[in-house]
Structure formats: C-alpha cells, structure tokens
Image (cartoon, grey):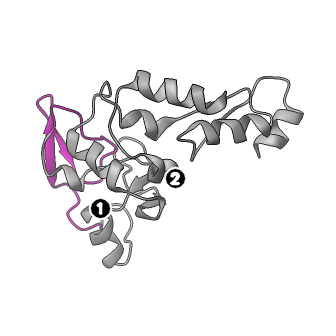
C-alpha cells in the first residue's frame, strides 16, 4: 500500500503500523515513504504519560497478543483499533461478542484518572495517575510490539533508529 500511495499521490507519504525500529523505517522508505511513525514504540518510553503496568505489558507482549477490534468504543464509536487482549476482551469474546448495550460488565467503572471514572469499553488508556483495574482498560498496541524489549528514554529510541538506518 505504501508503495502504491507514494507512487500515485502528489504529497509525501508517511508509513505507520508495525514499525518499531530502524529496519521497519528502512523498509517503509524503500517502499517510497518519506518517513515513518513509530506509535507503540514511543508509548513504551520514559517520557510517555502512561501507567507502568501498560508499559510492562507492552514489553512482555508479542504481535500475537494483539487484536484489531472496535470493542473499546466509548468515546470513539466505529473506529477499529489494535489493542492487547485483556480480561474485557476475553469476557466479551466468551459471551459471543454481543453488540454495545449487551456486553458483559458494560457501564462498570474499572478505573479512575484525574478524578474521572473510566468505564469498561471506554477508549481511554491508563495514564500515570490512573488507578483501578488497569488491565481491563483499552491497552493500545500495534503489531510491532514484539520488537519492544524495554522502556527507555525516547532519545535512546531515536538514536538507535538513526544508527540502524545509517
């Protein structure tokens, strides 16, 4: 897709999805992209305002631990997103994947952040100040998650990606 878009569009194309290192950036650029976005890789950095539990789950995960779903639609209906499978996903899946309004635990408050209740199926992700049942929340994670081996400073990520491109 990147190759086709870069060839046919009159604007620079950025590649995204499954890119977590210099090798991925190089492949995207070889396909004609002007650059690349490393979303999940930067979630697992020291500067990211994410809860340590989410970061730890990203480091431990593989691409097989993710699923593309529209399940966490509270505040973002109709938008599919890739997340880590968790207890909310498993309960919904085991219940036969019922539609909104019939999902198990729908309306349950699973966490709080900044004084605001977060319900199961909300699109909110766990921030540093989030408390509660974090594992049940929306834990965004792209296919490149398996290449994340540690939480580190963003500058180190950028430096390594740059050296892998050289």
Q: Residue at x 71, y 42 (%)?
A: 27
Q: 23 or 166, which lies in front?
A: 166
Determine if the magenta segment contains residue 149: no
Q: Which residues are magenta?
A: 103-130
Alpha carbon separation for disc pair 1 and 2: 16 Å
- Residue 46, percent from left and from top: 30, 28
Q: Residues within 10 Å of mark 1 (few under 14, many from 20)?
A: some
In the drawing, does residue 63 fall left or right of residue 43?
right
- Residue found at x 55% / y 31%: 161
Q: Can residue 27 be seen by looking at this rendering?
A: yes
Q: How many marks?
A: 2
Q: Earlier in the sequence, mark 1 or mark 2?
A: 1
Q: Which mark is residue 143?
A: 2
Vertical relation: 75 (above or below) 42: below
Left or right of residue 34, residue 149 in this image: left
Pinpoint residue 72: horizontal percent, then vertical percent: 36, 52
Q: Quadrant of residue 19?
A: top right
Question: In the rendering, at what x and y percent does residue 112 appear?
Answer: 13, 39
| Numbered tag placed on residue 131 in the rendering | none
Q: Nearer the viewer, mark 1 or mark 2?
A: 2
Mark 1, residue position: 86
- Looking at the rendered structure, the secondary structure element under dot 2 is helix
Relative to the observer, which residue lies in front, 79 or 50? Answer: 50
């Amino acid at each position: 897709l990147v190759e086709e878009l870069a060839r046919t569009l009159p604007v620079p194309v950025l590649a995204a999805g499954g890119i977590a290192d210099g090798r991925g950036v190089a492949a995207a650029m070889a396909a004609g992209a002007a650059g690349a976005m490393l979303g999940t890789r930067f979630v697992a950095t020291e500067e990211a305002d994410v809860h340590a539990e989410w970061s730890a789950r990203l480091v431990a995960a593989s691409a097989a631990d993710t699923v593309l779903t529209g399940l966490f639609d509270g505040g973002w209906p109709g938008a599919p997103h890739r997340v880590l499978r968790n207890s909310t996903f498993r309960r919904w899946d085991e219940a036969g994947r019922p539609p909104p309004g019939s999902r198990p635990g729908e309306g349950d408050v699973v966490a709080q952040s900044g004084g605001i209740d977060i319900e199961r199926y909300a699109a909110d992700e766990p921030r540093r100040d989030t408390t509660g049942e974090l594992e049940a929340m929306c834990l965004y994670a792209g296919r490149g998650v398996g290449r994340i081996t540690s939480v580190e400073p963003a500058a180190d990520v950028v430096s390594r990606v740059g050296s892998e491109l050289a």
